[in-house]
Amino acid sequence: GGMGLGLAEAAAVACATAGYVAGYAALRAGGVLPPGAAGAKRRAWAITFVNAVVCVLCSLPVTSRMLRGAWEAWRGGGRSGGGAWGGGGGGGAFWWVTVQQDEVENGFARAASTAFVGAMIADLLVGVLDYRKHLDPLTAYFHHTVYVYIHLQILRRRCAAGFQCFFIEELPTVVLAYGRLTGQRYDLLYGSSFFLLRILFQTWAMVSIVIFPNFRDALECEDFMWALLLSLSLHIHWFRGWVVSYVKYRKKLKAAAGAQPGTAGGAFKAKES
């Protein structure tokens, strides 16, 4: 209870971290993960993949409620005075996350944040030991450290339920990590889901937080606006990089197909989505 991060949270984070580390070690020992130095690049995506799947599953209750609320507000044509579009009172006044104040913080949301922190710490610990060459300064060291800090603050301020919906943004990571683990490419699925969730959805969410005062009051979300702005700018930076590399990849494919008609084109087709 209270505001502070208690012993229970610290123990939960330690358990989540240990769970991820033990799971990775078991898969590595059991030969499920690609072995040796050659397999390190693919192994490096294992914890990322499992964490992303867990995050997406944890987001579903809130995301489905949000979408239902948004659909009902749209269908009901809430544009007439106040209602879903105004900042006024009433249950529909803020349909982005249709959570009532009395159910804002719950054990499930806190467990989701705790598991996320555990995965970040485990990925760095295991990475330093088993795939250090493949830990990127921006996407691993910087990203993980910042997100551990953000989620510990979210837990401390009891805002976990309000941020549960953002876990749906891990869906593109599921696609990317699965592709990297299995050595396949799902470029368009990754790019489109990334743009939809990490740029459009997050922008909508941020605008909603600014527009609807009752949500701000309920969750003190403005304190975390810096985190949302930081992550949105990172997402835009990464998406730009993805577009550039995808265009290069397409050009290479065309060149290869032109050089050897009927062979290269077919060889790449299966790997594309």
Image (tube, grey):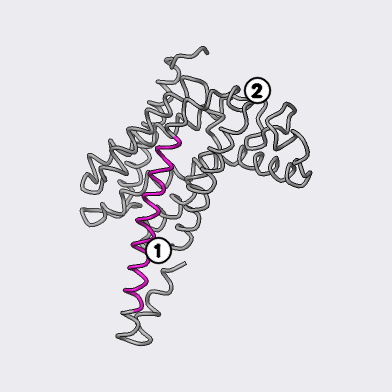
User: Relative to 163, is 25 above or below?
Assistant: below
Residue at image mark 1: 185
Determine the residue positioned at 59% across, 37% down: 208
Which amino acid does the dot numbered 1 rest on?
A: Arg
Determine the residue positioned at 75% across, 34% down: 83
The residue lying furthest to the bottom in this view is 261
Q: Secondary structure at mark 1?
A: loop
Q: Secondary structure at mark 2?
A: helix
Which amino acid does the dot numbered 2 rest on?
A: Gln
Residue at image mark 2: 101
Sequence order check, earlier mark of 2 and 1: 2
Quarter of the image where one finds residue 42: bottom left
Label 1 near label 2: C-beta < 8 Å?
Answer: no
Most frequent secondary structure within the magenta stretch? helix
Quarter of the image where one finds residue 58: top right
Determine the residue positioned at 63% across, 35% down: 97
